[in-house]
């Protein structure tokens, strides 16, 4: 009889094959999926991940995310073990840019020869080669269908923000540690310093991160997480994930400022105090930049101050929250 592997060991194997703790920016749980955001997606060993007992498949998520799919009877304990190894709360980390994304063609693959695991098995060194049960695969297929439906809900739906199987993170009012800030940057903000320096200046995205971190500390925020994506849906996901986790948002949606009702609806849905910020004075630029959808969900707009505008936005946001 093949020895079976503990959920603690499974979590260790997953962590090793996604590049270790330092490569994991955040970890969260969604249905049967361990959802990870990574600093360096190239560090992922997908072949080895797929061979870990209990792993039913992998899926890419956004530019630097991966989902590791388990059966519904296993995922909760693996997730809890993984969180204990990383020490990271769901979506509680800085997101970096400039990395090579996981292949977008990576899809969930469910194989009838996948391994099964019994939680809390005593052996942590040997791998089980028992095939996944039909019940596990059937349950997973149903949950994957539900997961896909949740992720494709229209922005104006009455369905609330996506929540994981884990207990929702409490707001800062319900925990010690002070106010938490989320800074969101949209498409091409990662290219400042290279992109049209006569408009956006020569300072880089790294300079924006340093400015935000310092401003947040100076203002009195206990925590500042920074996120950048060139994908509208990822930004919507990040805003939804901020529900009951962050106390304030500073957002530069980039070009989505002028096009995205979805981002506006997400901001309205979570009702987190938000400041809109722009490096250039967009209201004095091209005609198509005269409209800002997100402004309807913001109590203040800061523009035309270069990256120092982020500092003003963060200080003003803290003052607003402290009133």
Image (spheres, rainbow, N blue to C red):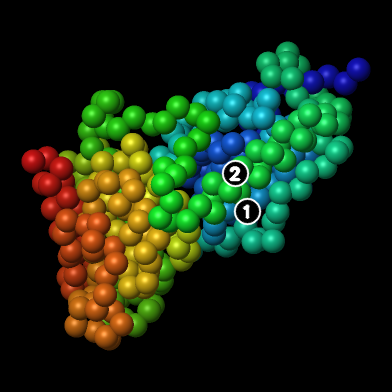
Q: Residue at x 66, y 61 (%)?
A: 103
Q: Secondary structure at mark 2?
A: helix
Q: Residue at x 68, y 25 (%)?
A: 73
Q: Position of residue 269 (x, y in %)?
A: 34, 48
| Number of disc labels | 2
Alpha carbon distance from label 2 to label 1: 14 Å
Residue pointed to by mark 1: 60
The residue at the far top in this view is 122
Q: Are marks 2 and 1 in contact (CB under 8 Å)?
A: no
Residue pointed to by mark 2: 147
Task: Tell me if mark 2 has few (under 14), some (14-19) or many (20+) residues whose alpha carbon lies within 10 angstroms of its own.
Answer: some
Q: Position of residue 255 (x, y in %)?
A: 36, 73
Give whichever of discs 2 and 1 has the lower sequence position.
1
The residue at the far right in this view is 1
Per the rendering, the mark at residue 51 is none
Q: Residue at x 26, y 41 (%)?
A: 247
Taking the image as shown, residue 51 lies to the left or right of residue 306, namely right
99 or 104: nearer the viewer: 104
Taking the image as shown, residue 99 lies to the left or right of residue 255, namely right
Height in image: 13 above or below 151? above
Q: Position of residue 20 (x, y in %)?
A: 58, 40
Residue 144 visible in the picture: yes
Q: Position of residue 305 (x, y in %)?
A: 17, 70
Which label lies toward us, 2 or 1? Answer: 2
Residue 214 visible in the picture: no
Height in image: 23 above or below 176? below
Q: Secondary structure at mark 1?
A: strand
Which part of the image, by quadrant, shows the C terminus?
Answer: top left
Which part of the image, by quadrant, shows the N terminus?
Answer: top right
Please tell me in which quadrant of the rendered image residue 236 appears. Answer: bottom left
Task: Tell me if mark 1 has few (under 14), some (14-19) or many (20+) residues whose alpha carbon lies within 10 angstroms of its own.
Answer: many
Please tell me in which quadrant of the rendered image residue 261 appears. Answer: bottom left
């Amino acid at each position: 009889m093949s020895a079976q592997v503990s959920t603690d060991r499974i979590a260790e194997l997953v962590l090793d094959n996604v590049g270790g703790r330092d490569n994991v920016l955040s970890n969260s749980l969604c249905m049967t999926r361990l959802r990870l955001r990574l600093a360096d997606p190239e560090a992922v060993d997908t072949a080895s991940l797929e061979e870990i007992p209990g792993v039913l498949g992998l899926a890419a998520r956004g530019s630097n995310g991966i989902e590791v799919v388990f059966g519904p009877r296993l995922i909760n304990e693996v997730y809890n073990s993984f969180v204990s190894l990383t020490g990271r709360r769901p979506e509680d980390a800085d997101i970096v840019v400039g990395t090579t994304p996981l292949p977008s063609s990576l899809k969930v693959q469910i194989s009838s020869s996948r391994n099964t695991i019994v939680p809390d098995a005593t052996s942590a060194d040997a791998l089980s080669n028992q095939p996944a049960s039909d019940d596990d695969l059937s349950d997973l297929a149903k949950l994957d269908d539900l997961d896909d439906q949740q992720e494709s809900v229209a922005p104006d739906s009455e369905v609330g923000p996506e929540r994981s199987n884990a207990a929702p993170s409490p707001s800062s009012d319900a925990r010690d540690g002070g106010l938490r800030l989320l800074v969101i940057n949209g498409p091409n903000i990662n290219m400042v310093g290279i992109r049209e320096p006569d408009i956006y200046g020569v300072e880089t995205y790294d300079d924006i991160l340093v400015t935000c971190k310092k401003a947040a500390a100076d203002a009195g925020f206990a925590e500042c997480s920074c996120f950048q994506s060139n994908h509208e849906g990822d930004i919507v996901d990040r805003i939804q994930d901020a529900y009951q986790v962050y106390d304030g948002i500073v957002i530069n949606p980039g070009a989505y400022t002028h096009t995205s009702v979805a981002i506006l609806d997400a901001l309205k849905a979570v009702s987190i105090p938000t400041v809109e910020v722009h490096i250039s004075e967009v209201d004095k630029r091209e005609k198509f930049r005269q409209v800002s959808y997100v402004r309807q969900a913001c109590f203040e707009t800061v523009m035309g101050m270069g990256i120092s505008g982020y500092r003003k936005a963060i200080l003003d946001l803290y003052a607003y929250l402290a009133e």
